[in-house]
Amino acid sequence: MIKVGNLQFKNPLILASGTFGFGDKFVSIANKMGGIITKGITVEPRIGNPPPRIWETPSGILNSVGLENPGVEKFCSVILPKLKNLKTNLIVNIAGNSVQEYEILAERLSSEPIDGIEINVSCPNIRNDKMIGQSAKATYKVVQHVRKKTKKVIITKLTANFIDPLITAQAAVDAGTDAICVINTLYGIAIDAKTGKLCLGGITGGLSGPAIKPFALYCVWRLASKIKVPLIGCGGIVNADDVREFLFAGAKLVEIGSANLRDPYVGLNILKEL
C-alpha cells in the first residue's frame, strides 16, 4: 500500500488524465489500478480544439484536444453516477483560467463521491499566453484557494515548460498540496514539410510518450530529495521497467498516459510484469 494524504493506493499505477476517459469504459481494467484520474473538468463545457487533434512523432505524440469536456455540472449529475462500479481511487482533474474557477470546481466536487482532486495548472494545448503553472506565485494561489474549499486529497500536476518545477512544486507544497505530479506534456508543434503549414487544429500541442521520459525522470529525481510530499512520476511510461526507473528516481506513484491511447490494456500488462 502507498499512502498519499488519507488515501491508500493498492499499487503504484494510476491511469493519467485525458488518456482513459472518465473510467466508465474498461472498468475491469481501472479497478486493478491504484487509481484513475478523469479527463480534465472545467466550470463550463468546452468543445475543445478543431481537428487534427493528434499528431504522431518519433517516439511520441502531440495532442491538441483542448480540454474538451461536458463541464462540472453535467459531470456531477450524469457521468459520476456511471462510475459507481469503480473500486479504485477516483481522482478528478480540474482546470481553470482563474483562481475563482478552480475554487468553484473544488467546492462543487468536495461533496461528491470522489477520492481526490488533481489540479491541472500545466495544460499546453489551450490558447493561453501563459500557464498558471509557469508562475510559482500563481501556483501557490490556486492551490491555497483549492485547499480552503476541500478536504479531499489534492495532487498538483506541474509543468516543466520554461519553468523549473522545483520552484513551483515548493510553492504548491507551501500552499497545502498533498502530492506533486511531474511532468505534464511539453510544448510542441508539427509543420508540414511540403507546405509549411501547421498541422494541428489547435496550433500547439503537448508532446508525450517515450521521447520525454528521460526529462521526466530528471524532474522527479531533482525534486525527490527536496520536496517533502509524495511525488507522482509521469512521462513516457510503457512498461514495468519504466515504472521501476521512476520509483528509483524517487516517485511513490506513477501515471500511465499516452500508452493507454495505443493499448487500453497496457496498465494490466505492466502490473503483471511488476
Image (cartoon, rainbow, N blue to C red):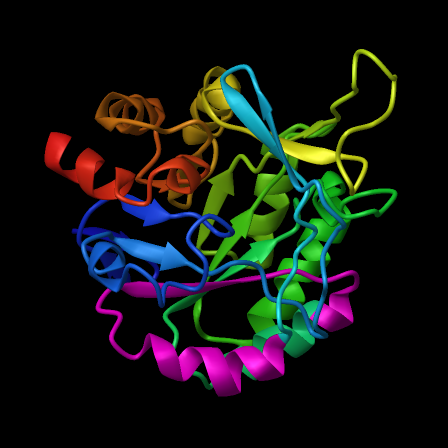
Above or below 222: residue 154: below
Above or below 90: residue 264: above
Above or below 51: residue 187: above
Q: Nearer the viewer, residue 214 or 250?
A: 214
Above or below 216: residue 125: below
Image position, residue 247 (x, y; %):
29, 29
User: In this rendering, does residue 6 appear at all?
Assistant: no
Locate the C terminus and report the quarter of the image it occupies: top left
Image position, residue 117 (x, y; %):
48, 64
Residue 79 covered by magenta stretch:
yes
Q: Is residue 125 left or right of residue 129?
A: left
Residue 137 covered by magenta stretch:
no
Q: Residue at x 79, y 19 (%)?
A: 192
- Residue segment shown in magenta: 72-101
Q: Is residue 262 left or right of residue 168?
A: left
Q: Nearer the viewer, residue 259 or 101?
A: 259
Image position, residue 81 (x, y; %):
39, 84
Q: Which residue occupies the extreme top position in the image?
A: 193
The quarter of the displayed image where residue 186 is located:
top right
User: In this rendering, does residue 182 appear at all?
Assistant: yes
Q: Residue at x 79, y 63 (%)?
A: 98
Q: Is residue 195 left or right of residue 152?
A: right
Q: Residue at x 34, y 27 (%)?
A: 246
